[in-house]
């Protein structure tokens, strides 16, 4: 018999079926063992009696088994169907599973290699897979090429304080914080490019939204101005959310997500300048001195005011990266997209094309100009206006799935205090 997926059980009412999976729940009653069997597609209650009772009775949860039996509609069974077992096969009788109810988040991280099979983790990882696919489709459908940049680099792009240093045959090199500087060179051949790759930041604090290794979707577009860039960010995020809503009602329900709030994620998103954001915050009792970057709690507050993603533009130069195009009033043509509960999910900008301005800004950051020679060349030979953005995929998953921490948004998180399992 061919093994069927558990989600197909209702199609077999009154018929024979073969299933395989893991024991999710186990209860021995009088003359009958109730097993809730789980595979990657769902769960179903199975009942074992007689000869099969003897085999089923000693099984511990997470044992791997096969079942042949008959599907019966039964109101009392979770999901409305149960399988009456004719034949039970034991593939592997599990040892006592270390995860029981109500264990601390920290313990669950210690045994993440076992916790990845839990319902909330599996639901999250399925949604995460769809998010990755949606990003690819979004850009490829719009004529973008996928372009890869190196992970070993010699330059900082997002500030020196979060660089991971590596010994590169006696030379000091760094793990890439972003693909951007290489992307800005590659647009001269390809014009419209994107990537999905890990980025590395030596984040020295453990927060609910920082990983040291995170998955970064980045895009760079020749000839594109700041306004079109913001639209692109808005459309990308709405597209991702739409895809998740189309394919993952069941998973969103397992995670207890507010689906109505996600349905409201449609362009345009409210846009305000940094200055306007400070005014709004002050009205709500949060005073931020001009020139200070917004902190997570302030970002969250702004989103709470609108109940949807918000775009904040024109930050002061000094809080943003050296490559962002200068705008009047010592601000930049850069934006952050903020979402409820998480804060920043996108950073993007039109790029500065003036070499003099770039040099000044690099010097201010204490960077040595020589290391950036290749980057300056992109401004010497047919320089054109261009813009791009980076989206933190783990944060997007955290937001969509309503997770308290980014650690729950990825299979095996990397943070300052965790590099295993
Ligand atoms: O705002 P950031 O630093 O922008 C850049 O890296 C640009 N070079 C992107 C570009 O224009 N091509 O990072 C972009 C996004 C952030 O908005 C955030 O969502 C995510 O990357 N991010 C992190 N996610 C998890 N853990 C961290 N430590 C992150 N640092 C940034
Ligand atoms: Mg940023």
Image (spheres, rainbow, N blue to C red):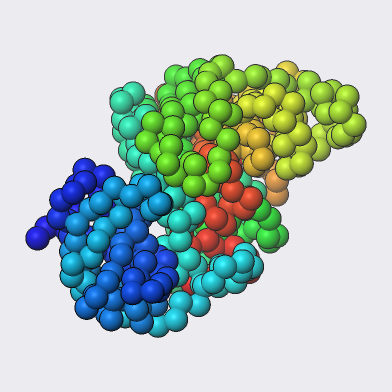
Can you give x and y, in whole percent of width and height, for residue 239 in the image? 43, 27
Q: Is residue 319 above or below residue 98?
A: above
Q: Is residue 362 above or below residue 4?
A: above
Can you give x and y, in whole percent of width and height, for residue 289 in the image? 88, 34
Q: Nearer the viewer, residue 295 or 156?
A: 295
Q: Nearer the viewer, residue 357 or 291?
A: 291
Residue 134, image quadrant: top left
Q: Is residue 5 left or right of residue 180?
A: left
Q: Is residue 228 visible?
A: yes
Residue pictured at 33% horizontal, 23% vertical:
142
**What number of labels is visible?**
0
Q: Is residue 91 left or right of residue 259?
A: left
Dividing the image into four quarters, tell me where ligand 1 lies: top right
Residue pictured at 25% horizontal, 61% vertical:
84
Residue pictured at 26% horizontal, 58% vertical:
83
Quadrant where the image shows the N terminus: bottom left
Which residue is at the far front?
30
Residue 356, image quadrant: top right
Can you give x and y, in whole percent of width and height, for residue 270 in the image? 65, 19
Residue pictured at 55% horizontal, 55% vertical:
408
Q: Is residue 388 visible?
A: no
């Amino acid at each position: 018999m061919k093994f069927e997926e558990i989600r197909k059980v209702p199609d077999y009412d009154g018929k024979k079926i073969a299933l395989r999976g893991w024991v999710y729940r186990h209860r021995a009653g009088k003359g009958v063992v109730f097993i809730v069997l789980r595979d990657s597609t769902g769960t179903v209650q199975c009942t074992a009696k007689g000869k099969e009772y003897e085999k089923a009775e000693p099984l511990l949860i997470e044992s791997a088994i096969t079942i042949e039996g008959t599907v019966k509609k039964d109101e009392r069974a979770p999901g409305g169907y149960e399988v009456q077992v004719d034949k039970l096969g034991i593939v592997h009788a599990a040892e006592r599973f270390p995860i029981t109810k109500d264990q601390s988040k920290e313990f669950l991280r210690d045994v993440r290699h076992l916790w990845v099979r839990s319902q909330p983790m599996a639901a999250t990882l399925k949604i995460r897979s769809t998010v990755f696919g949606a990003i690819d489709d979004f850009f490829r459908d719009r004529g973008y090429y996928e372009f890869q940049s190196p992970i070993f680099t010699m330059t900082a792009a997002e500030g020196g304080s979060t660089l991971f240093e590596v010994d590169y045959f006696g030379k000091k090199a760094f793990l890439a914080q972003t693909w951007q500087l290489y992307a800005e060179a590659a647009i001269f051949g390809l014009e419209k490019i994107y990537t999905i790759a890990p980025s590395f930041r030596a984040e020295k604090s453990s927060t609910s939204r920082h990983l040291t290794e995170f998955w970064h979707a980045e895009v760079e577009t020749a000839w594109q101005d700041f306004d079109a860039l913001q639209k692109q960010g808005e459309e990308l995020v709405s597209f991702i959310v739409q895809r998740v809503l189309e394919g993952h009602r069941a998973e969103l329900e397992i995670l207890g997500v507010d689906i109505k709030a996600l349905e409201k994620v449609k362009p345009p998103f409210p846009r305000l300048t940094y200055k306007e954001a400070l005014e709004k915050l002050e009205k709500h009792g949060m005073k931020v001195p001009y020139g200070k970057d917004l902190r997570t709690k302030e970002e969250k507050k702004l989103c709470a005011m609108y109940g949807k993603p918000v775009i904040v533009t024109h930050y002061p130069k000094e809080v943003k990266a050296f490559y962002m195009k200068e705008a009047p009033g010592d601000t930049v043509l850069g934006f952050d997209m903020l979402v409820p509960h998480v804060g920043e999910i996108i950073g993007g900008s039109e790029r500065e094309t003036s070499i003099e301005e770039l040099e000044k800004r690099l010097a201010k950051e204490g960077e040595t100009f020589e290391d950036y020679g290749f980057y300056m060349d992109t401004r010497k030979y047919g320089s054109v206006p261009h813009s791009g953005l980076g989206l933190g995929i783990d944060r997007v998953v955290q937001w969509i799935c309503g997770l308290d921490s980014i650690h729950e948004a990825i299979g095996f998180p990397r943070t300052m205090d965790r590099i295993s399992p």
